[in-house]
Amino acid sequence: MKPPNRWQRHAQAVRARSFTPLRRALRVPVWGDLTLRLVAALVLISIVVMVHWLDREGLKDSHDGYISFLDVVYFTMISITTTGFGDIAPVSNQSRLVEAVIVTPIRVVVLFIFVGAAYSLVIKRGWEKWRMARIQEKLSDHIVVLGFGVSGSEAVAELVARGTDPHDIVVMETDPERLAVAEELGCNVIEADATRDENQMAVRIDKARTVLVSAGRDDASILIVLTARHLAPTVPISVVIRAEDNELLAKQAGADNVINPVRFTGLLLAGSAQGAHLADYLTDLASVSGRVQLVERLVLPEEIGKSLRDLATGGLGLRIYRDGEVCGFWDAAAGTLRAGDQVVEIRPTDANGGG
């Protein structure tokens, strides 16, 4: 067995240290849950006070023989909490029946409410933190989003719209307000600096399905890509770069896909100048809400040996990526699909088809 290399030793050291665990939004906030429980308990206690006040003739005060409203409140509280000093006690048969049939069940419910509140505040939060730490340790085949600005948030929203489970998405961001938005979507979130290798290790970036980088600044995005490529040599990385001069740097840092939103906007504008519907169709292709969408996938076994024009999915084949080469549907190489080919096709997204 080979001894661990420098990166493996560093990873082990990082895992041994404590780090901020992932978070996932709760259906009801902790303080909201506690407020609801407290209101329910107060309502039940008020009911018991009312019952005791209406039946005060059946109570006996060994101190002064007189039952005031304060005595009723006092007796209710010691009765609900099962303290029972004995200075006030039910003496009539009716009062004892009320205690047995009405007050005792309410007492049990109130106790359950307070026990449940303690569970939610202490035990449940501790359990949730432990559970998320275990999830964090076992992350695999997930999507890591480093930066949740405009581009990052739009990417996550589109992924969810395309059917990706938000629990399979991990968002890393330093802005708590942006993280709150991602948390509301159901994503796992972690408040951390994505440029630091220990934080990327914490989300097991080497086990990710893909990494999306959108830090808002090109220098930060390139540094994040460089760090991610060191830690995850084989994981696909896509990055948003706004300056054309930095696109080559992002590629050299290890990005597989470099997206320039300014350039894409220019393509849409140019398309609209050459035809009224070109920009509309390009937008249609890019979004799951359109009638058609672009899909990249591995060639299917039943498609091997067939042409790119005869895809089993019924989609319109556009390109083949084979051994680092790009083949269009017009190329001779597209006439025969081979095992390992990556196919890019257009598929309809509605039930009736369309294009």
Image: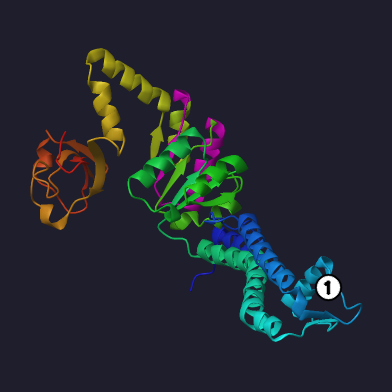
Q: Residue at image x 60%, y 68%? A: 127
Q: Amino acid at mark 1?
A: Ile
Can residue 103 be seen here? The reply is yes
Badge 1: residue crowd in 10 Å (few <14, some 14–19, many ≥20): some
Answer left or right for 215 relative to 284. right
Q: Magenta segment: does it hold 244? A: yes
Which is nearer the eye, 63 or 135?
63
Which is nearer the eye, 230 or 87?
87
Residue 43 at what x, y percent from top left? 65, 62
Q: What segment is highlighted magenta in the picture?
A: 218-245
Q: Is residue 325 above or below residue 341?
A: above
Q: How is the image coloured?
A: rainbow
Which is nearer the eye, 177 or 337?
177
Helix, strand or loop at label 1? It is: loop
Q: On the image, which quarter does residue 29 sit in?
A: bottom right
Q: Residue at image x 57%, y 60%? A: 11
Q: Residue at image x 14%, y 41%? A: 352
Quickly name the residue at label 1: 67
Which is nearer the eye, 52 or 194?
52
Q: How many marks?
A: 1
Residue 139 at what x, y percent from top left? 47, 61
Work out which residue is located at the far top of the displayed protein and give it. 273
Indicate the quadrant containing the C terminus: top left, top right, bottom left or bottom right: top left
Residue 140 at what x, y percent from top left? 43, 60
Q: Is residue 147 above or below residue 198?
A: above
Q: Is residue 247 above or below residue 230?
A: above
Answer left or right for 96 relative to 264. right
